[in-house]
Each structure stands twice: as C-alpha cells, then as structure tokens.
C-alpha cells in the first residue's frame, strides 16, 4: 500500500489510474496540470508520483525544478507520447522510470512495483 | 515636287542616260540648226548670183532682138532659157513694157511685181525680189534692162574706124531699150534645204540613239556592281549574313566590294558568336531553372513535412491519451470480470463496469474522430480536385484539435470564436488547413507564455464580388514583426527562426493558397504588442484559369 500522486492533463488517464491503483490497494491523489501537481506534492508526502511529461502550465522538468529538494522525497514515473529532449533534461536532474503512452496496465504494475521496491530498499 | 527632288527617286543609270541624251539632242539641234540656217542662206545667195549672171547674159543676147523687135530671135532665147530647170518664166519687153517674148506664165502679185518694176525703171539697173505667186509658191524674180550702145552705132555710121580713142569710148552711152524679167523657182532650193534638214535630223537621231546605247552600256558597266552591292546590302539587312559580292575590279567599286565582303564576314562572325552565346545562355537558364524548381519542390515538400511533423506530435498526444484510456479500462474490466464471482456481483460493481465500458466507448469515439480528421486532412491534401464545398469553421476547428496540445504545453490560450452564420465556400480544405496550421503555429511561436491567440471568423456580405466574403482573423499578443521585415514575411525562405525550426516557406505558401482561393491575406503588427493576420476569402470567386490551378495544385500538394 503506497500513496501515489497522479499528475496528467488527460481526464481519462486520471480516472483510469485512480480506478486501477485504488483497486490494487493504493491510495491515489490526482492533479490536472503542473501547478496543481506542485501544490499537492508540497502539501502532502507521496511515495510515488506518476506524471505526464508534457502538460500545460509546467512540464515535467519544470515541476521537478519547482519541487526543489522535495522531489527527493518520492519516486517519479514519467509518461510521454514520444521521445524528445525533455526526457534527457529530466534524467540529468533525477532518476526516474519512463512509461511510453499508451501503456499496458501490467506494464504499469511492473514499473510501479519496481519503483516501490527501490523505495523500500532506501 | 521640284525636278531635283524628282531625280532623287530615279536610278543612277536613268539619270545618266536622260541627262546625256537631253544634252546631246539639244547640242545636235543647235549645231545642225545653225548649219542648216547658214546653208539655206548660201543656197539663196547662189541662186541670186546665178540668176544675175543668167539675166545679164540674156540681156546682152537680147539686145538685137529687142532693137529690131524680132520675136523670132527672142523666142529662140526663151527656148534656151527653158533649158535651165530653175527658170520658170521669162519675159522680154520693150521700153514701153510691151511683151516681146514670153515663156512660162506666172500669176504674180501685181503689187509686188509693180514695185520691182518701178524700182528697176527708176534706177535703170538690175534688181530682184522674192515674190510669192497666187498659188503660194515663192519665186526669185529678177529684172534687168536690155541696153544698146547708141553712140557706137553712130560712130560706125560716121565711118570712124581704127584706133581706140578713150575719149570717144567714154563718150559712149548705153541706152535702155527694153526689159527682161526672169522668174526662178525657189522650190529647188527649198527642197535642198529640206533635204539637208532631214539629213541633219536623221544624223542627229542616229547619233542620239548611238549615244544612248553607248551611255547605257557604259553606265550599266558602272552601275551594275553598284546594283549588286545594293542587293547584297539588302540581303544583309534581311539577315542573310552569308551574302558576298563577286566584283573583281581594281577601282573604287572593287575596294567597296572588298570592304563589303569583310564587313559581312565580321557581321556573320559576331552574329554566330551571339547565337552561340544565346544558346549556352538558354541552356544555362534551363539548367538553373530546373535546379531551382527541384530545390523549390524539395523545400515545399520539406515545408509540408515539417507541417506534418508539427502535427504528428500533436496527433500522437491526442491519440495516445484516449488509446491509453481504452487499453487500460479494457484490461482493467477484463481482469475484474475474470476474478468476478457472479453470485457476489453487486449493483455497484455493475455500475462500475458500465462506467468503464462507457469510458472505453467515449475514448474510442474520440480516437475515431481524430483519425477521421487526420484522414480527411491527408485526403484533401492529396486531392487534386480543387473545388469542393468547404466549411471554413470546421476546417479551423479540426486544425485546432491538431495544435491545441502544443498550445496547452506552451501555456498559450487558444480563444476560438467562430461565427455560426458562415456560408460554405468553394476551395480546398487541405490547403486551407495548411494555411491555418501555419498561422496558428507562427502565432504560438511568437507568443509568450500566458498570453492568448485569438481566432475569429466573420461573414461580411459587403466584401467580395458576389455573395460577400469570409473574414478570418488570427491575432496574437506576441513579439510582433519589425517594420523592415513586414514586407519580407511573405517571401519564400524568409524566416527569423533558428535553423531547423522554420523554413520560411509557411507564409509564402499560405499567400499562394489564399490567392488561389481568390482571397487576400494581410498583416498588421506592432513590435512588442502583437500581430494580426487577416484573411478575406470570397464566398464566390472568379475562377482562375485551370492552368494555374493544376500547376499550383501540383507544386504545393
Ligand atoms: N504571428 C507572428 N508574429 C511575429 N512574427 C511572425 C508571425 N508570423 C510570422 N512571423 C515572421 O514571419 C517569418 C516568416 O514566417 P513563415 O511562416 O513564412 O516562416 P517560418 O514560420 O519562419 O517557417 P515555416 O513556417 O516554414 O516553418 C517568421 O520567421 C517570423 O519572423
Ligand atoms: Mg510558419
């Protein structure tokens, strides 16, 4: 059981992740854009953040820099549709898992479990 | 027109011949006229002299005949007279003018003959007169006294003989005892004069003709090469640079011919050079044009590719989210249903399943719409058919779906206000979509985060030819366009964007497309405040010629 923050501008992705992650026993909080995501991440602590890389009002990279030191409190899974320079820049400042959209739920589960395992190790 | 001006139009040969002939004829006429005149005077004097001699001899011979009134003797004289062809008449009269002998008969003008007689009687001497008779013939009438030496007669009568006593001799006196008149015909003289005139005229004619022939021959010899030169020059003028003259003379004309030939030769050379140059130039132009066309096609293609590339990112985002939803919900629902024990299924479960499947359906529909839009775009992009009914609002809405994701990421608002009374226009949706995409992306690139790009459509019945026009505005509050660039933005390859980000073809292609639709695209911009592009599209356009349509159609699409 982990506490997960989902940040995505797509409503269907947010509701899907909420449904699925809740079903497999996690606690889920969602945000519709980068700003809201930063606010929620600051307000609470989360184990994992599943975040869309391209979003209005702050992309994944800006979100990371905005969070500052707080970003080290949680693990990140970034989702995106196609590879671009943003991914490279994020990897410069943070370790993260990447999930290419559209993703399989089994894929997500594997990545999530892997991420949670590394949290436990820490 | 004066004579001189008249002569300008005449050939050299004619000028020569005419002037020479005129001069010749005039001089011949003067010379022969003078000669004939002189000769006719001579003839008359001769006639007069002959007549005088003849009449004096006759007077001498007639002395005794008159003295003794012997008609017989005098008639003999008359017969002798008749031997002379020129003598037409002869009269011998005594002192009282009674006719003693007569030959021929002339009807003389009595006044003239009377004058002659009076004159001769008064002077008691020889006299003559040209008298025209009643038939109009002219005669030389001569009159001379017939004299008798009376004192001699008396000396003889006195019986004084021997020795010559000059005093006696001088004392001898002649006494007029009668008159003799001769009528000489002038006709023969006139005839001779006429013959002379005729001969002179004939000679003149022959000389003139001969001279003309000679002059023509000489002048031809001189003018022939000139004519040849003139013809050759004319051929040269008409562009036959191979013309040469064949004149082998050592005079000035020969020199002229040589100069002409070398001139023609150098003309031919320079013409050939120019032609050669033109040919290579043409080839070069064709080659360059081809290269340029290829480059342009490539660039237009790459512009299209970049437009498609820009779209692809948007489309990928647009498609991936609903696809992820569908995939996820499908898996999730399946998993749940597999684990599901029918007896334990609660209405709440059913409700959840319904929501999941409903979401799947909604998202699948969204995918369908996106794919349809994309297909329509690609189909109309490829379609060579230019004229179709286009709902501009719909095209703008579709374009917006492709770019809105990029706008959202750049945090630029896209405010779209579409008038709902827009009539459809005839045009090409794919082309218009390319225009709108470019304008939207341009505006997005120029805009700062947090600002908005406003798109308005409006129907204006007053604009355009018939049926009004659509007015489409794409306004941003971006960095604007510098005054000096404003003129250049519609030029191909003009871009202020970094290499790889813009080809500079967007607006030039857009301009072409809008023109193709019979419309106008204009821009207003203030640096630091924003830019507005306005497109006016007529609802009905005057169709451009089919040529340009296909040409443009091939070029851009
Ligand atoms: N809305 C705008 N605001 C400011 N500048 C603009 C705007 N639209 C166009 N421009 C200027 O006009 C130039 C030409 O635009 P154009 O669309 O023809 O080419 P591009 O956008 O640079 O490249 P491409 O469209 O081929 O990718 C741009 O580089 C930019 O400087
Ligand atoms: Mg452009």
Image (cartoon, rainbow, N blue to C red):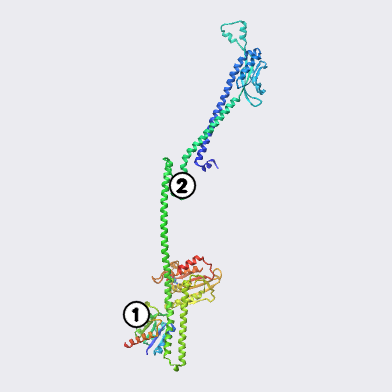
Instruction: Give me the residue at 54% from left, 75% from top.
Output: B421
Residue B453 visible from this viewpoint: no
Residue furthest out toward the left: A121
Residue B224, position as x, y percentages in the image: 47, 41
Residue B89, position as x, y percentages in the image: 64, 21
Q: Which mark is residue B233?
A: 2
Residue B298 visible from this viewpoint: yes
Residue furthest out toward the bottom: B343
B6 lies above or below B420? above
Q: Which corner quadrant of the image does residue A3 belong to?
A: bottom left
Q: Quadrant of ligand 2?
A: bottom left
Secondary structure under tag 2 reads: helix
Q: Disc 1 is attached to a residue of which chain?
A: A
Secondary structure under tag 1 reads: helix
Q: Which mark is residue A91?
A: 1
Mark 2 residue CB less than 8 A from any atom of ligand 1 = no
């Amino acid at each position: 059981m982990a506490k997960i923050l989902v940040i995505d501008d797509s409503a269907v992705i947010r509701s899907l992740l909420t449904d699925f992650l809740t079903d497999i026993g996690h606690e889920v909080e969602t945000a519709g854009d980068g700003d809201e995501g930063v606010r929620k991440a600051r307000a609470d602590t989360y184990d994992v953040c599943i975040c869309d890389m391209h979003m209005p009002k702050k992309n994944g990279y800006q979100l990371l820099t905005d969070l500052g030191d707080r970003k080290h409190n949680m693990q990140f899974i970034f989702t995106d549709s196609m590879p671009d320079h943003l991914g490279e820049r994020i990897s410069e400042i943070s370790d993260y898992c990447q999930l290419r959209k559209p993703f399989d739920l089994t894929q997500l589960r594997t990545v999530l479990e892997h991420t949670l395992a590394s949290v436990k190790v820490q | 027109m004066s004579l001189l001006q008249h002569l300008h139009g005449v050939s050299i040969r004619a000028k020569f011949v005419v002037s020479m002939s005129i001069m010749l004829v005039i001089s011949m006429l003067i010379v022969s006229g003078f000669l004939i005149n002189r000769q006719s005077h001579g003839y008359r004097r001769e006639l007069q002299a002959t007549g005088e001699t003849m009449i004096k001899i006759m007077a001498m011979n007639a002395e005794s005949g008159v003295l003794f009134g012997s008609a017989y003797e005098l008639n003999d004289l008359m017969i002798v007279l008749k031997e002379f062809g020129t003598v037409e008449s002869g009269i011998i009269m005594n002192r009282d003018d009674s006719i003693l002998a007569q030959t021929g008969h002339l009807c003389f003008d009595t006044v003239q003959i009377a004058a002659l007689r009076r004159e001769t009687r008064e002077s008691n001497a020889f006299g003559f007169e040209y008298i025209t008779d009643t038939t109009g013939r002219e005669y030389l009438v001569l009159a001379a006294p017939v004299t008798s030496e009376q004192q001699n007669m008396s000396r003889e009568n006195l019986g004084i003989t021997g020795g010559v006593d000059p005093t006696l001799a001088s004392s001898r006196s002649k006494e007029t005892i009668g008159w003799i008149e001769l009528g000489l015909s002038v006709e023969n003289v006139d005839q001779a004069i006429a013959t002379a005139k005729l001969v002179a005229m004939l000679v003149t004619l022959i000389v003139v003709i001969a001279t003309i022939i000679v002059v023509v021959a000489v002048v031809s010899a001189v003018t022939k090469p000139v004519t040849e030169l003139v013809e050759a020059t004319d051929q040269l003028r008409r562009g036959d640079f191979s013309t040469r003259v064949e004149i082998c003379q050592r005079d000035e004309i020969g020199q002229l011919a040589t100069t002409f030939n070398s001139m023609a030769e150098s003309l031919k050379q320079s013409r050939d050079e120019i032609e050669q140059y033109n040919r290579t130039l043409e080839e070069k132009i064709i080659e360059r044009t081809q290269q340029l066309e290829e480059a342009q096609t490539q660039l237009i293609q790459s512009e299209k590719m970049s437009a498609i590339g820009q779209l692809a990112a948007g489309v990928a985002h647009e498609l991936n989210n609903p696809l992820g939803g569908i995939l996820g919900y499908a898996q999730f629902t399946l998993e749940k249903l597999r684990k599901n024990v029918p007896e334990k299924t609660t209405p709440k479960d059913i409700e959840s399943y319904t929501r999941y499947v409903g979401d799947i359906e909604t998202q699948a529909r969204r995918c369908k719409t996106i794919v349809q839009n994309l297909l329509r775009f690609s189909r109309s992009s490829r379609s060579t058919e230019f004229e179709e009914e286009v709902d501009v609002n719909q095209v703008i809405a579709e374009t917006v779906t492709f770019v809105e994701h990029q706008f959202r990421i750049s945090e630029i608002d896209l405010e779209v206000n579409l008038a709902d009374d827009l009539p459809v226009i005839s045009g090409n949706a794919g082309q218009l979509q390319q225009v709108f995409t470019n304008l939207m992306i341009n505006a997005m690139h120029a805009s700062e985060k947090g600002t908005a790009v406003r798109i308005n459509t409006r129907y204006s019945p007053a604009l355009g030819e018939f049926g009004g026009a659509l007015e489409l505005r794409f306004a941003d509050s971006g960095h604007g366009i510098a005054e000096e660039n404003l003129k250049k933005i519609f030029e191909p390859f003009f871009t202020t964007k970094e290499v790889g980000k813009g080809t500079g073809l967007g607006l030039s292609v857009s301009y072409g497309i809008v023109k193709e639709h019979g419309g106008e695209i204009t821009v207003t911009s203030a640096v630091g405040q924003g830019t507005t592009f306005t497109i006016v599209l007529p609802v009905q356009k005057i169709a451009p010629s089919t040529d340009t349509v296909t040409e443009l159609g091939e070029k851009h699409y």
